[in-house]
Amino acid sequence: MHMTSIVSLGLLLAIAPRIHANAAGCPDHPVETLQIRGSTLCLFIEDPTPSRRQLLRTWVERSANIVADYYGRFPAPLAVLRLDGMDGDGVGGGRTMNESGLVIHVSVGRDATPQVLSNDWVLVHEMVHLALPEVGRRHNWLAEGLAVYVEGIARAQYGNRAIADVWAEDRHSMPMGLPREGEGGMDQTQTWARTYWGGALYCLQAEIAIREQTDNRVGLQAALQAILAETGGYGFERDIDEVLRIGDAATGTRVLEELYQQTKTAPLTPDLELLWSRLGVPRDPKTQPFDDHAPLAAIRIAITAKRKS
């Protein structure tokens, strides 16, 4: 989840780390300063006991490297992570904000274990937001849909999430992103389901179409890397049409632009059962084998294949 810059002055003063920067570029005095492929991550931890500090450092480093592997670099030169404690052993909600600097807030259970944090998706999701420029609230489905889609793919490519688990979630959850009766296009219907899973479905459709048109040489990942490189990511504002043109130029297609034109004001209902069949995704990917002879099986395999360095 990410938030745009409409915050009261009182809240801004409370959360925005904007006092004096230290030598590393971090505001104030973070508990940890991490270097991830030339980027600086400033960690502020509520309870920086030695054991918790190391636990959270490992989690942040792994999550940041997952995102950096997908995009070819970490998507922001400097970012602040505020890790707030909460009761329990899980990971709570996250927010990515551009308020006097890029800030990610995530709540973490005080009893969280290494296994819980290894299986976490929230921090990767929030870090993915850093790679897309601000395109406006009307297009929040693109920001959230990308974060949902890329989180699973990037973690699978990195070896942090089972490939079957990614496809199982997509098969189970993407139907929630289909338009309901009376709903409009992606820019018109801003329900939770259309924003998150409708946006993720847009990404999957674009991924497949790009790979079909390029003989599976490149996919959505190449488009997103180019968008980050040319726009600078979430610290900047860009028109959605410009963003999609940049992505299409990188793949030599017009997939992103054309799919957006088809879906922005009109409900589009793809045949998901046909799509899963063509990809070779079984009804229950966790217990049933994939069909590697399906028409789009090679595309399915390429999507989650580890990126060559």
Image: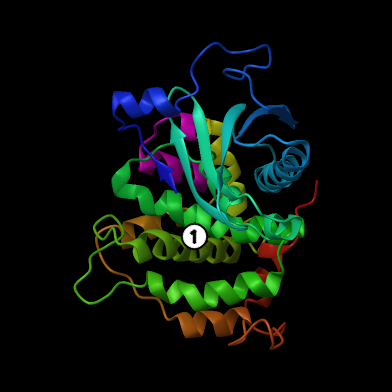
**In front of the other: 166 or 34:** 34
Q: Is residue 249 visible?
A: no
Query: Residue at (69%, 63%) from the top-left corner?
Result: 304
Task: Please rate how many residues cluster around mark 1, counting C-alpha atoms within 10 Å: few if below 14, some from 14 to 19, many from 20.
Answer: many
Q: Which residue is mark 1?
A: 203
Query: Residue at (54%, 47%) from the top-left corner?
Result: 107
Q: Is residue 66 visible?
A: yes
The outermost residue toward the left is 182
Whether residue 112 is situated above or below residue 74 in the rendered picture: below
Whether residue 185 is situated above or below residue 243 in the rendered picture: below
Query: Residue at (37%, 43%) from the top-left corner?
Result: 241
Q: Which stretch is magenta?
A: 234-248
Residue 140 percent location from the top left of the image? 36, 49
Query: Residue at (54%, 11%) from the top-left corner?
Result: 20
Residue 270 percent location from the top left of the image? 40, 76
**In front of the other: 97 or 231:** 97
Residue 174 falls left or right of residue 108: left
The outermost residue toward the right is 309
Q: Is residue 235 magenta?
A: yes
**In which quarter of the view is residue 207 placed?**
bottom right
Residue 42 percent location from the top left of the image? 64, 28
Secondary structure category for the residue under label 1: helix
Whether residue 249 is situated above or below residue 9 in the rendered picture: below
Q: Is residue 244 magenta?
A: yes
Q: Main secondary structure of the magenta part?
A: helix
**Three-letter residue code for mark 1:** Cys
Residue 110 falls left or right of residue 201: right
User: What colouring does the structure picture have?
Assistant: rainbow
**In which quarter of the view is residue 229 placed?**
top right
Residue 252 percent location from the top left of the image? 55, 49
Residue 208 falls left or right of residue 9: right
